Amino acid sequence: MTAIAVEKLISEAVARPELLEMLAKQPERVGQELGFGSAQLEALKSADRQTDRPMYPVTFTTGTTIEA
């Protein structure tokens, strides 16, 4: 993903904490909602497939925890 896409994703996640849960469950939908191009969407899908472990539970520095 480009630095601009990462910056946009982070700024949106800060503004909308529920986006983090949606990103963990439906990364492609988040990318489409943020207006990412096809290469950026593929990067999100690829990163999701490459994880060898489930993404849950995730605890962020804000104290928000996402459970499966």
Image (spheres, grey):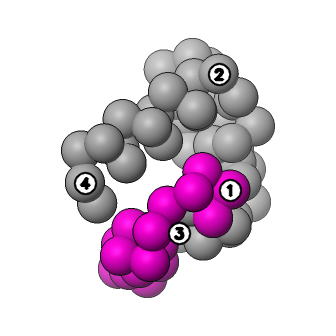
Callout 4 amino acid: Thr
Which residue shows up at 74% across the image and 60% down it? 68
Callout 2 amino acid: Ala
Mark 1 or mark 3, earlier in chain = 1
**Residue 24 position (above or below residue 42):** above
- Magenta residues span 32-50
Mark 3 or mark 4: which is in front?
Answer: 4
Mark 3 or mark 4, earlier in chain = 4
Circle 2 residue: 15
Between 64 and 37, the one lying in front of the other is 37
Mark 1 or mark 2: which is in front?
Answer: 1
Image-based side of 30 in relation to 55, left or right:
right
Between 53 and 39, the one lying in front of the other is 39
**Residue 9 position (above or below residue 34):** above
Mark 1 or mark 3: which is in front?
Answer: 1
Which residue shows up at 36% across the image and 35% down it? 7
Looking at the rendered structure, the secondary structure element under dot 1 is helix
- Characterize the magenta stretch by its predominant secondary structure: helix
Determine contact: label 4, label 1, CB under 8 Å.
Answer: no
Circle 4 residue: 2
Circle 1 residue: 33
Looking at the rendered structure, the secondary structure element under dot 4 is loop
Determine contact: label 4, label 2, CB under 8 Å.
Answer: no
Q: Residue most toward the left?
A: 3
Circle 3 residue: 54
Q: Position of residue 4 (x, y in %)?
A: 31, 42
Label 4 vs label 2: CA separation? 20 Å
Q: Look at the image and say whether residue 29 sits in the magenta stretch.
A: no
